[in-house]
Amino acid sequence: MLKRKMTARLTEWKNSGKSNGGRKPAMLIKGARQAGKTFVVREFARANYKNFVEINFEKQSSARVAFKGDLDAQTIIRNLSTAKLGRFEPGETLIFFNEVQCCARARTAVKSLVEDGRFDYVMSGSLSGIGYMDVPSHQANFEEQAVMYPLDFEEFLWATGVSADIVDRLRDDYAAARPVEAFLHQRIMKAYREFLVVGGMPEAVGTFVENDNFSNTLKIQRGILDSYRNDLSSKKADKEKMLAKKMFDAIPRQLNKRNKRFVLTGIEKGTPARKYEKALTRLTETGIVYNCFKATALEAELRFNEKRNLYKLYMLDAGLLCALGKSGIQSALLRGDIETNGCGITENAVAVELAKKNIPLYYYDKRGRSEIDFVFEENGGLSAIEVKSGENHKTHALLDRACEETETPLRRRMVFSRHNTEVGANGVIYYPLYMTMFLG
């Protein structure tokens, strides 16, 4: 069983009711499809509740009927209990509204259900579907929200048998900016290369852990990619979804460029940017793609200096990017050959770690003469990240020039590469790539 950080979040949520007479808001878990939402809720319920009632509004369309009439708790519970979905025992039951985006009235009913107080409620759904739901403005008072992502590298280490004590040692080394013991560095760097190939989709990680077989993992990844494409090109797909699919398939090619900026002419020559505006919004709202906007100035409050028509697109998972990219990149990464940066795999992996920590993604580029891969707000200032896949990790002229040109000194300048930790004479901290799990 994969250990997930969301389980700890659910435990905190459950315990929050102890100081409020047992009553707590419903928990709403959002995320991209196949990120592990359903599995985590089921396992949490088995470990913490006597009874578990799951209602999947996508697969059990008949369950939506229970919410067509009055939305008072008594009526809803009576309707659900007559459907023989499980035992409804007050104080001992978790009710799970799965794929809640398929039944907006179920989410609206949460107010009366929470006020009733007899049962605990967890909801889950896709980011895009929930984003378009029309719910009352008071709903925020009766639900707590969390976003579920694929496994991050720390969770991947847990899954592959690396103890929490080892992770704590690495965390201490990161905080102190000191080198990791050579043997441990080699071991964790090998695990990181595996993570780049396997990624963090739970089914892919579970298959790898059970079989230690990258071929089987690749089959799982390609199946997930096909399901994402199907979602974008279903029978009900509109023009924006079809354009979003084109953008999705173009990501590896665009990340393989030197500056990695997403250029629409790379998909369709002479196309106006406005043609793809809604498609881009649809694509990012699914949670399967992260948008990294250009910052026009290195100043606090980056959102005030973002240029939304200039951006990079990263996939939610490095392993899926590998599977979508050019043939043979997996073997090269496992051998330690990440210098080609195969389709921007390493930079994508860093972007994903930042996104999972709710750090907005920005890059900085001043006409190609000064450049920063990622810049983010930290402790009242700005910090910069450069991602290096080759041997010359201490050569970063564009980063140096950007730092020289800004009037606001950067709090931290970090270069992440395959090499061990070192603090340079110029104040730059050189970290191994796996240390990105401790950012934020």
Image (cartoon, rainbow, N blue to C red):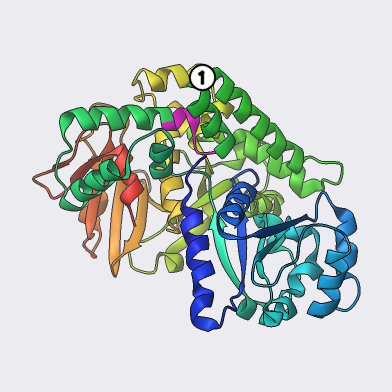
Residue 429: image location, x then y, percent: 19, 46
Write down the region rendered in magenta.
195-201
Residue 196 among those drawn in magenta? yes
**Image vertical order of residue 249 relative to residue 310, above or below:** above
Specify whether residue 369 is in view: no
Q: Which residue is mark 1?
A: 213
Is residue 68 at least partly visible in the picture? yes
Local packing at callout 1 (Cα closer than 10 Å; few below 14, some 14-19, many 20+) is: few
Is residue 400 left or right of 331 when viewed as pictured?
left
Residue drawn at point x = 64 percent, y = 40 percent: 247
Q: Which of the 4 image quarters holds residue 25?
A: bottom right
At 23% from the left and 51% from the top, the residue drawn is 413
Q: Is residue 377 above or below residue 153?
A: below
Secondary structure under the numbered disc 1 in the rendered image: loop
Of 179 and 374, the residue lying toward us: 179
Q: Residue at x 80, y 56 (%)?
A: 57
Residue 334 lies in the magenta-colored region: no
- What is the three-letter code of the residue carrying label 1? Asn
Q: Position of residue 402 (x, y in %)?
A: 27, 51
Nearer the observer, 362 or 193: 193
